[in-house]
Amino acid sequence: MISKYLFYATTIITMVLLFSSCNQADEAQAAVDREDTFFLLEKFFEAEEKRLQSANIGLDKEIRINEKEEQQLIADIDYSREFSMFRKADINRPAWSDKYQADSTLQQGGLEIKYTSLDPELKTQELFVMMNKEGEVEKIDIVSQTETALARNKSWMTYEPKVGYLIKTQQENRTAETLNIEIKGRFVAQ
């Protein structure tokens, strides 16, 4: 039964969330240095996929849909598929250059960048990137939303390169019960 919900949740989240080099520090700094672009989220996650697969890192994955829960340890993981929702939250589109407000601050030698949507119709409403003093990404937070004739969705996603990720989605369906979906992925050495 939970597998049915897992399939349903994965399908919904994938449909709802339309989401470098190998050196994180270089890519992060290059994204900040460009005047007319935002942080290159899609390229960052492509690099993370390569890093995790080459290091043979597995995933301890926990999925909760409303009150039903399933946990699995995955050794042979397709990180491209796992990170697709994050990559699709990339805001780096020429047509959106004036649709986000960027705010950056230095915190303990590291850089924090927050992009906030100026258009309530855009899917990605907030993108927050925290880098350490070496320019390596330590954390990414994303808030996204979508609405169709059948459902309204709001998602909160967090990614930490040394830990894993957390995706929380609330789907308010017009013809069915509200779904609260939580997916946690913790990286595990093999």
Image (cartoon, rainbow, N blue to C red):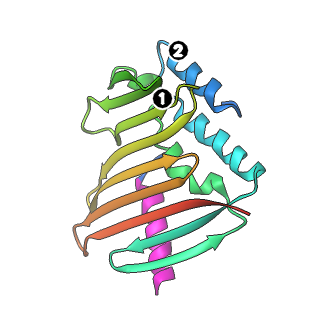
- Viewer-side residue, 172 vs 66: 66
- Viewer-side residue, 95 vs 58: 58
Q: Quadrant of the C terminus?
A: bottom right
Q: Alpha-carbon neighbours of circle 1 within 10 Å: few (<14), some, or many (≥20)?
A: some
Q: Residue at x 66, y 39 (%)?
A: 47
- Distance of mark 1 from mark 2, alpha carbons? 12 Å
Q: Position of residue 3 (x, y in %)?
A: 51, 81
Q: Position of residue 26 (x, y in %)?
A: 64, 24
Is residue 125 rendered to the left or right of residue 92? left
- Viewer-side residue, 54 vs 121: 54
Q: Which residue in the protein does label 2 denote?
A: 34
At mark 1, the secondary structure is loop
Q: Is residue 54 above or below residue 7?
A: above
The quarter of the displayed image where residue 113 is located: top left
Q: Which residue in the protein does label 1 denote?
A: 92
Between circles 1 and 2, the one closer to the viewer is: 2
Q: Position of residue 122 (x, y in %)?
A: 32, 38
At mark 2, the secondary structure is loop
Q: Alpha-carbon neighbours of circle 2 within 10 Å: few (<14), some, or many (≥20)?
A: few
- Please tell me which of labels 1 and 2 falls first in the chain: 2
Q: Position of residue 181 (x, y in %)?
A: 37, 67
The secondary structure that most of the magenta stretch takes on is helix
Farthest residue, direction bottom: 1
Q: Is residue 3 above or below residue 129?
A: below
Magenta extent: 1-16
Q: Residue at x 69, y 50 (%)?
A: 52
The quarter of the displayed image where residue 170 is located: bottom left
